[in-house]
Image: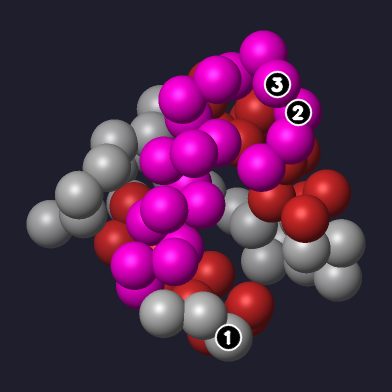
Amino acid sequence: MAEIRITNKEWERVKIKVQRKYNHLTEDQLQYNEGDEESLISRLMELVKRDRNYILFTLKKALVNMDNNRL
């Protein structure tokens, strides 16, 4: 089970942040359904060539301040 929970509403904001940081990622690559955090984490690990801890850190950071568009 994933260490984080992301709602579909939260993901819309987080996705913008992720796309700004990794501008090579496409909408299709960043598809997400609520409750499918494990799949999202695994996919991001492959796409940005980073380990699980880094991906979790990045996602948690994005969730902390939803009003800030930076990661």
Q: Main secondary structure of the magenta part?
A: helix
Q: Residues within 10 Å of mark 2 (few under 14, many from 20)?
A: few
Q: Secondary structure at mark 3?
A: loop
Q: Is residue 56 above or below residue 52?
A: above
Q: Quadrant of the C terminus?
A: top right
Amino acid type of the residue tagged 2 in the rendering: Asn
Q: Position of residue 69 (x, y in %)?
A: 75, 28
Q: Are marks 2 and 3 in contact (CB under 8 Å)?
A: yes
The residue singled out by tag 3 in the image is: 68
Q: Quadrant of the N terminus?
A: bottom left
The span shown in magenta is 52-71
Residue at point 41% right, 41% down?
Answer: 60
The first of marks 1 and 2 along the sequence is 1
Amino acid type of the residue tagged 1 in the rendering: Lys
Residue at point 55% right, 20% down?
Answer: 65
Q: Secondary structure at mark 1?
A: loop
